[in-house]
Amino acid sequence: MRSKTQTDGAARIGIHKVASHARVSIATVSRTINHVPTVNPVLAARVWKSVAELNYVPNTQARALVSGKSKLFGLIISEITNPFFPELIQEFERAAVARGYEILIGSTNYEPEKMELCARRMLERNVDGVAIMTFGFEESLLDRFAGEDIPVVFIDVTPRHPRSSNLQVDYRAGIYEGVQHLAVLGHRKIGFISGPLRLGSAETRKLAFLDCLRCAGIKPQSAWLVEGDHTLDGGRDAMQRILQLPEWPTAIMCSNDMTAIGVQHALFEADLKVPADFSLIGFDDIHLAEYTIPPLTTVRMSCKDLAQGAVTSLLANMESTQSRFETRSKINTRLIVRQTTGLPKMSSAI
Amino acid sequence: MRSKTQTDGAARIGIHKVASHARVSIATVSRTINHVPTVNPVLAARVWKSVAELNYVPNTQARALVSGKSKLFGLIISEITNPFFPELIQEFERAAVARGYEILIGSTNYEPEKMELCARRMLERNVDGVAIMTFGFEESLLDRFAGEDIPVVFIDVTPRHPRSSNLQVDYRAGIYEGVQHLAVLGHRKIGFISGPLRLGSAETRKLAFLDCLRCAGIKPQSAWLVEGDHTLDGGRDAMQRILQLPEWPTAIMCSNDMTAIGVQHALFEADLKVPADFSLIGFDDIHLAEYTIPPLTTVRMSCKDLAQGAVTSLLANMESTQSRFETRSKINTRLIVRQTTGLPKMSSAI
DNA sequence: CTGAAAGCGCTAACAA
DNA sequence: TTGTTAGCGCTTTCAG
């Protein structure tokens, strides 16, 4: 059923057709389109002409098969629905496509099995490298990639592992600025809504917060340390739990911006005002943070740095011939003050 | 240093190794893993055992090369940064992965050249089908895909084209509900902030709005029809332009939710209240719409329907042996009333 | 500098 | 039912 009709428009033009059309060998065509410098310019010109006329597009699959490189990067994220990740993806895509790579995206939705599935999908497609941007994961996963000698880059975690790079986020700097900012305004009762604590980085952020609190001479109160899940709903729920407490903090820091937006919503529903009743600080500085009402004070972590760092590391790692290759680079954070922070509300218990 | 040590884990296991390990031919391995029913169960068992022990993962590239099917879908969107699209992607991914397909995502960012680039990327990677979810595009693009006989699915536009499917969104229904809702509240002065009008669907939405206005017996006022660009910034700017006008509308409908959130921000900056000073209706019903302050009344367009419809069409289209294959399916819209709509402010000019 | 030829890992005839 | 074999479209030695 397939080969009979020649009229079918079908079957892509292959290197063979180009070769005969340009009256050269397929090897010459291959060299030309791969910009091998030793090709006779006259022949090259003929080839390019044929390529254009026949509308030839090289078949990446075949290329991948013979070269062993798929020109594909895997990008594993937590949840595409959290705006931080699309911003990350955008930068990652930009960097990757500019160098001729495509991206395979996998979302774990914070479920370990999904992570496993993602790893398998990436392996099957033969990715040349994987960026695990989930802010925490089972280290056993790395073995799968290590087994195939596939470069991996990830955040925070520092497993001892060949062909892996590490992007170290300096949470402390930004969070410290946040705590200081609050302290200067007069806040002493500061709560923290964390991410899912089984995520390493969520834990790290919380620890950084606690540490900063101590540095600022403020005693953390465990009731005000509540676990969220980095989603809008999670932030709202967490705040509602805090509102149930006998004593309220005067300020809340959140492990990410989505949580903070959820908090704003909970407060809105409870008819409480930001920053009059509660000061609020987010984390990430997604574009939306500027657009919340009121605009969100937050700690910026550049997803552009993250994305570019990831692509760069992957590339460097691939080029390196060392069987062991480990890097780490630092990602900075800093406070962006907008309008969700203000003087603490003077409660009955002065 | 790589091949000597067998322990190296290196170089992926191929079908060959599995075959010899299971003491069968590679053909039998191939048949087994492809679930060809005629394989002797005993041999099959041996094969599966070897597959597991050797941790064999089939090489998709090779498969694609010989079978001619890449098991890859292209998904072209406008802007990954607009939360509507991640929600779409999530559903699309779910549907595609469940059937063994991977997704290649390309963003056009509303730039025609980017669209061209996306098409090329998809072609190079040999996608089995493309979903163009940009709500408008140059039809010339379709020719590229048609030339390769690649199924395409898209929104609204209905070009005459083989192997194409069409998802027809019923904008009118939801928009009409919105206009009616406003009319019932007493609004007669209703503005509309459209998307970029060179996008077909943005134009369609605007036309639908105008038509609904007429049906409700309201005369549209051209000064209140302003062009946005479907982004937060665009929405804010558009609203600021409206605030410059000598006479204000009492309600605003937006071509998408991001625009509406931008509008809320502009109003916040101008110290105007929603819905006291302006009623506001969005479009899309992204998850965030529930979390804006106050929560956004909006027209819901199910991105799940869109995504699933797209995948289903693509699949059906591929299976069809007809060289021409056209479908269209309908996507419904409906109003979700939340808290950004209320009675119109009684202006000086009663 | 160019061309012929050998595969990359797999599927699908075809033969046994 | 199983194994042998011929490619899929391309890159890459290796001769010329």
Image (tube, coloured by chain):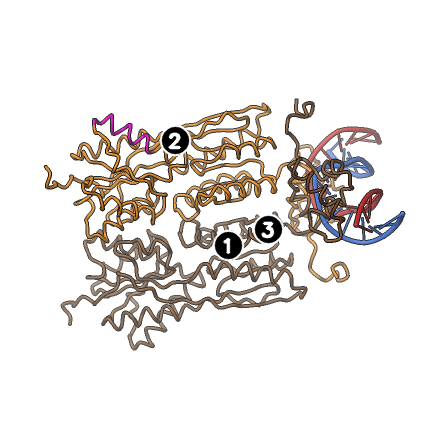
Chain colours: A orange, B brown, C blue, D red
Labelled disc at residue B92: 1
For the point 53% across and 57% down, the residue is B131
Pointer 2 indicates a residue of which chain? A
Image location of residue B198, percent across then percent down = 43, 60
- In three-dimensional space, the C-alpha distance between marks 1 and 2, rounded to whole angstroms, equals 32 Å
Res D4 quadrant in image: top right
Picture layout, residue B209 above or below residue B14: below
Q: Which residues are magenta?
A: A206-217
Labelled disc at residue B100: 3
Disc 1 residue type (three-letter): Phe
Q: Is residue B174 toward the left or the right of residue B26 in the image? A: left
Disc 3 residue type (three-letter): Gly
Q: Earlier in the sequence, mark 3 or mark 1?
A: 1
The quadrant of the rendering that contains the C terminus of chain A is: top left
Labelled disc at residue A169: 2
For the point 27% across and 58% down, the residue is B241
Image location of residue A348, percent across then percent down = 10, 41
Q: Is residue B155 visible?
A: yes
Question: What secondary structure is marked by label 2?
Answer: strand
Pointer 3 indicates a residue of which chain? B
Question: What secondary structure is marked by label 3?
Answer: loop
Disc 2 residue type (three-letter): Val
